[in-house]
Structure formats: structure tokens, C-alpha cells
Image: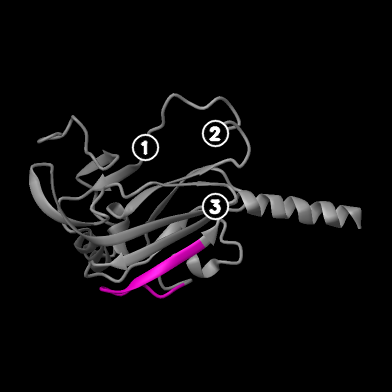
Amino acid sequence: MAMLVALVLALCATMARAAVVEHNFTVGGMNISQLCMDSVIYTANEQMPGPTIEATEGDTVVVHVVNDSPYPLSLHWHGIFQLLSGWADGAHMITECPIQPSGNFTYRFNITGQEGTLWWHAHSSLLRATVYGALIIKPRNGTDGYPYKAPYGEIPITLGEWWNKNVDDVEKDAHLTGLGPEVSDALTINGKPGDQTPCRG
């Protein structure tokens, strides 16, 4: 009995410290100039990469998504253990129906037994090339959420690919030829192609 009481008290203490981390994402078109070309791409909140989600182990993450793109899509929380929330996994046409254009959906899931840097991305066609971002999970215990002295600063680094054409067309061409998608025109770090490419910046 004493063990059960201790377990319940520990669970209550953890729940009391947990927070709700809430974000609003609008997936829509954004004008961008990369590799000497002007393009319209689809991003979350007109950012590439999209917003970074920071949570602490034990928190509940809530993301309200509005789809202002012309494509049905879902968001996948890559690496998150979806314990009792499999419908929030974002696997397009597997765990949920896609969010239709002009539609909206709210994702809600708990961060349980995890810490580290993961990522989230669109889970429909190659939109994940432009609709993505970091998901940082800090440990519950430690100095400022770290099990060691807090670092001087943090900058999440996300790696990606860039095509000089609509990523949906890249995927359609791959299906028509039966081959994989064509090789990207550039690799990116935090959405930028780097200094070794034309029209850098």
C-alpha cells in the first residue's frame, strides 16, 4: 500500500510540473529567392525552417494547424512516442486523414520518456522539403532543463534539400518515371544553400 501511495504522489508531482506548450502553424505560400530563382514555396508561418518547438519531458504539446496551401497535408512528429495518441502521429492516410486545403486540425500529444532533438515535417508528397522544423525536448531534471551546466547558446541545425521546381512536381515526375525523385539542386542548412552556390546569401 505504501508503495502505491508513493507511486501516486510521484505521478501527481510530475503532472504538476508539466506544462502545455502551444503553437499555431499556418501552412501557406511564401515568396523566396534561392539559387538565382524566385519561387513560391509552402512553409509553416512563412519560415524555412519552420518554428522550433521547445518542450520539456512530461509536457503536453498542442499545435493548431491551418492549411492555407493547395495540397492536403498532415504534420508528422518524427520520433515522438505516440503513447495513447496514435491519431496525432501525422502519418498521412495511415493514422489520420490529411488536412484539406482551407481546413484545420489540432495535434495534441504528451512527451513521455524522451529527450533530445527531433524534428517535425509535412507528411505528404515532398512538402517535407519546405514544411519542417526542430522539436527540442529538454530533460525534466537538471539545471535549466539540462543534466549539466547550461550552454552559452543554442542554435538548432536542420539539414534539407532544395529543388528549383515545385516539390510536388518533383514527386509526380518520380512516379511517372518509376524512379526516385531527381537529385536536388542544393543541400541546405537551416533552409539556406550555403556560400558555394550561385546567388548565395
The residue nearer to you, when weighing 38 against 109, is: 109
Residue that label 3 marks: 19
Q: Position of residue 173 (x, y in %)?
A: 21, 63
* Residue stretch rendered in magenta on the structure: 96-108
Q: Which of marks 2 and 1 is nearer the N terminus?
A: 2
Which quarter of the picture shows residue 142?
A: top right
The image shows residue 180 at horizontal and vertical percentages of 30, 57
Element assignment for label 3: loop
Label 2 is placed on what type of residue?
Asp
Q: What element carries label 2?
A: loop
Q: Which amino acid does label 3 sit on?
A: Ala
- Give residue 157's mark: 1
> Which one is in front in this view, the residue at disc 3 or the one at disc 1?
3
Residue at image point 27% right, 46% down: 161
* Mark 1 nearby-residue class (10 Å; few <14, some 14–19, many ≥20): few
Q: Is residue 179 visible?
A: no
Magenta-drawn stretch contains 80: no
Q: Is residue 90 left or right of residue 99?
A: right
The colour mode here is: one colour
Q: Position of residue 98 (x, y in %)?
A: 37, 72
> Nearer the N terminus, badge 3 or badge 1?
3
Q: How crowded is mark 3: few (under 14 residues within 10 Å), some or many (20 or more)?
A: some
Among all residues in the image, which is located at the extreme front? 16
| Amino acid at the residue labelled 1 | Ile
